[in-house]
Amino acid sequence: MNSIEIQQETTTDAVPDSGQLQNWVDATLKDYPDDTELVIRIVDKLEISQLNEHYRAKPGPTNILSFPFDAPDYIESNLLGDLVVCAPVLAEEALEQHKALDHHWAHIIVHGVLHLLGYDHVEDNEAELMEAKEIEILAQLNIDNPYNEANEV
């Protein structure tokens, strides 16, 4: 099983349990070694806003930030990196998009882990590849395509 350190720094109650987070990470990493490590830090809007401003020069909160870990050649490490997830933003987005909260959490965790693996969505072709991978992984979790508005609850 992959190792996840969960740091819960939010005052929001609507947070998935460690088993759900583990399941979503494992589904995303199914083709990778089982000893992969990552950190999931669950925060409120203030912390994510500060990180978003500092690392991306973008004001305000966002749903997730991914910080891949690139170990120097002389250090052996299974650490993929850190995900910082803003629980209140996810709750607001799920409500606005009429999606089940746990499905939105699953999507965002899968999305973040894919970023740690090197996937991106800056260019259109990269976005299509990343979205296809997300849809495939979420389907294995019995979660409908998050990009299809017909799947809103």
Image (tube, rainbow, N blue to C red):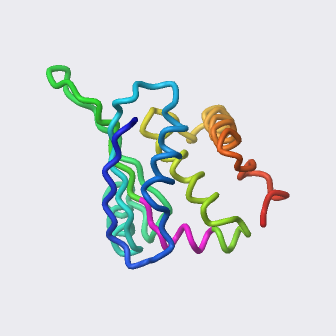
Secondary structure, magenta segment, majority class: helix
**Tally of numbered discs:** 0
Q: Residue 42, image x and y in percent?
A: 38, 63
Whether residue 82 is situated above or below residue 6 in the rendered picture: above
- Is 88 inside the magenta-drawn segment? yes
Residue toward you, 3 or 64 = 3
Whether residue 122 is situated above or below residue 118 in the rendered picture: below
- Residue 119 appearing in the image: yes
Residue visible at 28% across and 32% down? 70
Q: Which residues are magenta?
A: 85-93
Quick check: 19 left or right of 150?
left
- Is 113 inside the magenta-drawn segment? no
- Residue 124 appearing in the image: no
Quick check: 96 left or right of 28?
right
Q: Residue 76, image x and y in percent?
A: 20, 24
Residue visible at 45% across and 69% down? 61
The quadrant in which the N terminus is found is: top left
Q: Farthest residue in the left direction?
A: 74
Residue visible at 51% across and 50% down? 109
Residue visible at 75% across and 49% down? 144
Q: Farthest residue in the top direction?
A: 73
Q: Residue 128, image x and y in percent?
A: 68, 36
Whether residue 22 is situated above or below residue 105 in the rendered picture: above
Q: Residue 124, image x and y in percent?
A: 66, 37
The quadrant in which the C terminus is found is: bottom right
